[in-house]
Amino acid sequence: MSIQKNLHYINSLLPKHVTLVAVSKTKPIEALQEAYNAGQRIFGENKIQEMTQKWEQLPKDIEWHMIGNLQRNKIKYMAEYVSLIHGVENLKLLTEINKQAKKHNRVINCLLQIKIAEEDTKAGMTIDEAKTIITSDDVLEMKNIKIVGLMGMASFTDNKDQVTHEFSSLKTIFEELKTDNKEFKTISMGMSSDYKLAIDHGSTMIRVGSSIFGARNYNK
Ligand SMILES: *Cc1c(COP(=O)(O)O)cnc(C)c1O
């Protein structure tokens, strides 16, 4: 299957309110260009350096989403152009994003990452931690960030009931936090293996990599 056909297939399944982020990490510029030529404009990467190199080389109407674990000292390299940061895990990171965005006179949209999986390896905060952040005076004073929703990753398992339960819990948390934040509109959940389930349970943004670009090879 070609990248173009894969994109066409996935787009044909998406309800209007769901945004597709094409996760292009580890993939060469040519693959991203092919997706771009097929109409894709939103790309997700998990390494700031790799994303910045791709941003420099590809057309400027692409929206770049950072979906990986954030290193605080590298935020400055993407502050000029990143359009959405999915995995914000704590107040320190928000503070740094705000500081770097200010230098470029920008407002950077952010999603708080909530831990929904049972596995300890999956990052994220609890609903109470998210609530504390959203309602804190420090955050309300940060004029160069906007918290627009939540991101979560389900457990890596074949157990559909468990994944369904985890997606539903993120949706419930979203609805509860929404009452404290009028800007809330995005629930980023669902990847190649589980995006259909995620959409059925309230996702508004899916992050799909291998189903578009093929399996990743990390040994290069
Ligand atoms: C790599 C990655 C994805 C995409 O994974 P696929 O299984 O290839 O679709 C989605 N979200 C995050 C956070 C990722 O790191």
Image: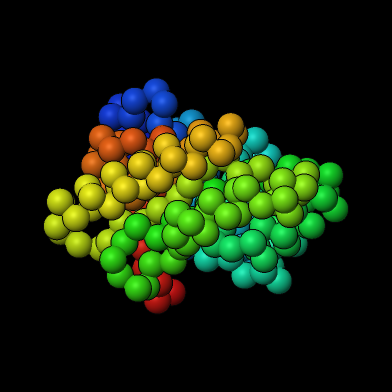
Question: Which residue is rendered at x = 71% and y = 71% of the image?
Answer: 73
Find the residue positioned furthest to the bottom.
Answer: 219
Image vertical order of residue 164 relative to residue 175, above or below: below
Question: Which residue is rendered at x = 40% and y = 76% of the image?
Answer: 219
Where does the image place residue 210, in percent across and percent down from the top left?
Answer: 33, 53
Instruction: Using residue 209 as the reference point, say whether residue 158 is left or right of it.
Output: left
Instruction: Using residue 219 as the reference point, say whether residue 196 is left or right of it.
Output: left
Quarter in which the N terminus is drawn: top left
Q: Nearer the viewer, residue 68 or 61?
A: 68
Among the 4 quarters of the image, the one containing residue 138: bottom right
Q: Is residue 8 visible?
A: no
Q: Nearer the viewer, residue 15 or 172?
A: 172
Instruction: Using residue 79 as the reference point, say whether residue 118 is left or right of it.
Output: left
Where does the image place residue 124, in percent across and percent down from the top left?
Answer: 46, 62
Q: Nearer the viewer, residue 9 or 64?
A: 64
Where does the image place residue 149, in percent across and percent down from the top left?
Answer: 52, 42
Quarter in which the C terminus is drawn: bottom left
Where does the image place residue 198, in percent across and percent down from the top left?
Answer: 29, 42
Question: Which residue is rendered at x = 69% and y = 62% of the image?
Answer: 75
Q: Nearer the viewer, residue 122 or 205?
A: 122
Q: Is residue 180 visible?
A: yes
Question: Which residue is rendered at x = 38% and y = 67% of the image?
Answer: 122
Find the residue positioned furthest to the top.
Answer: 16
How many labels were placed on the picture? Answer: 0
Display coloring: rainbow
